[in-house]
Image: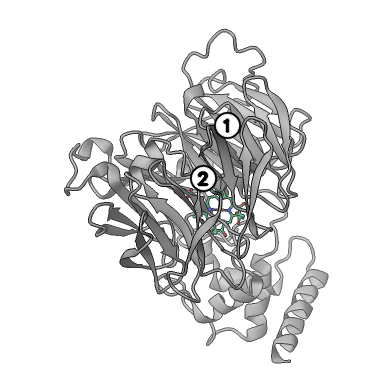
Amino acid sequence: MKRLLLTAAAVLLATAVRAETVPGEKSGTEELFQQHCAACHGTDRLGGTGPALLPENLKRLRPKAAARVIAEGRAATQMPGFADKLSEAEMASLAEYVHTPLPEVPRWRMAEIRDSHIIHNPLHTLGDTPVFSADMLNLFVVVEVGDHHATILDGDSFKPIHRFATRFALHGGPKYSRDGRFVYFASRDGWITKYDIYNLKPVAEVRAGINTRNIAVSADDRYIMVANYLPHTLVVLDARNLEPVKVIDAVGSDGTSSRVSAVYTARPRNSFVAALKDIPEVWEISYLDEPPNDYAGWTHDYRKESGDLEPVARFPKRRITVHDYLDDFFFDQDYEFVIGTSRKGTGQVVNLDTSRVVSELEIPGMPHLSSGITWNYRGRTVMATPNLKEAEVSVVDMESWENVARIPTLGSGFFMRSHENTPYAWVDVFFGEHRDAMHVIDKQSLEIVKTLRPAPGKTAAHVEFTRDGRYALVSIWDMDGAVVVYDAKTLEEVKRIPMVKPSGKYNVWNKTRLSEGTSH
Ligand code: DHE
């Protein structure tokens, strides 16, 4: 009842704020924000020392949870609690306010990006040999979202080597340079960080967007491409020091502006491939200095902007029209096909060479294709994907694009992983009452051979293998969490390393060698 009254009070307050505010005049809630929050989160809510407070950036924090954070503060951050300064209704109205979209897409272009650029340690000041000894290609970077840290973990001894603070709310897989020396992180707030693993020091940072999806590193290690929801842009950074090079507007051939779903590097093609979330188009963008002459259909219709480091003719792109916009997608190992779904669940297979949709996928629910993996099954290549809405794993033949199997699970899953050297594929049960379960599937019989529960009652998620595939590392998604190491053959626990909500872990070898069992 108390909660109902509170919510009602907040709604009344927010409605009153909306009704009484004359354009140009500040509402009571806005004033509260400026008084108590703006110093850290920015007068425009775009972030400062604290994260951006926009609905797009706060998807993981519902208004009720936001009100709790305002009241109690956030452990291990500089966010204090306001319970002794603000009334419950004020805190509820602030929580609602930060979930209200800004009247227009904020400006975040070359000038703003350039202003945000920070060099922490110039490259020439950093030595070329590691300051610790370990197999540098068998390291893991573990992202601990619980308190916004990352840990460099030795993949042989499973001992943490170094733990350091990251930007708020990292999301997606960090990406490595080809030699594994540098790791690049992206935060939901658009901060990109280059970190030198050899020296255990950050190199540079830049804020490339207001709300960012993910990043990709070119195969020649020269460029980083950043995909943004806010604003609607792709941003090219110089991989050496993250200096911005080019801002590419995500605008469809009909002039519609769009969020970018994600961007990946198609290594054999020397291109970035991005999908647009609001337009049924996939873009291929070349990063070659001199694209070949047969680039028929490639354009460089970008707007020249003051501050661009490159002539307009760099990064030509071509548009591939698809049947429905792609939200979530991955590639075959040769990067000939893009396999994607929209959040509505329609699956499509796009041939990048012919620029055509060659097949539709018949997978029910919402396959989580960015977590898709492939393997050889009875002489043919299959892909498998967990499903965010259905309690099953789908296995699809990558030649006929027909379903090979639908493997029932205890609930819908988020992440799926395997390795060339293991007969098993691991999939979590991320949602529902069995979220503490981890299924191990035999890649040939396509049956679940074991269901592990590494920490009963706590979410078990996201697996990654050591470079040789002998061990599988599972996350316990809890503030009092862990990375649990399993022998990938006997499926017995080997070690438990305490971690603070380790969202994901990324093995240098598997990522840089594009293992078929992991994301790239
Ligand atoms: Fe992710 C990867 C999109 C919600 C944790 N997630 C990705 C990637 C995309 C994506 C496009 C690939 C990026 C890359 O590695 O280059 N994620 C989305 C969504 O659209 C979705 C459903 C909604 C959203 O809020 O954006 C979503 N993701 C989540 C979460 O709620 C998760 C579970 C917790 C969190 O940290 O926000 C989450 N996503 C992850 C992780 C990866 C990821 C750990 C990296 C997986 C990997 O092994 O590569």
Q: Residue furthest bottom?
A: 1
Q: Quadrant of the N terminus?
A: bottom right
Question: So how many labels did they put on this image?
Answer: 2
Q: Amino acid at mark 2?
A: Gln
- Of circles 1 and 2, which is in front? 2
- Residue 505 on image: x %, y %: 40, 54
x, y (%) of residue 279? 74, 37
> Mark 2 sits on what residue?
444
For image coordinates 43% across by 36% down, the residue present is 514
Residue at image x 29%, y 60%? 163
| Position in image of residue 463 (x %, y %) | 44, 55
Work out whether residue 251 can be spotted. Answer: no
Q: Secondary structure beneath disc 2? A: loop
Task: Tell which of 373 and 123 is nearer to you.
Answer: 373
In the image, residue 91 sits, relative to residue 116, either above or below, namely below
Q: Which mark is residue 273?
A: 1
Q: Is residue 19 visible?
A: yes
Along the line of sight, the residue nearer the viewer: 441 or 119: 441
Circle 1 residues within 10 Å: few <14, some 14–19, many ≥20: many
- Callout 1: CB less than 8 Å from ligand 1: no
Q: Amino acid at mark 1?
A: Val
3D distance between C-alphas at marks 1 and 2: 32 Å
Q: Residue at x 60, y 35 (%)?
A: 274
Q: Point out the residue furthest to the right here.
A: 19
Q: Which mark is residue 127?
A: none
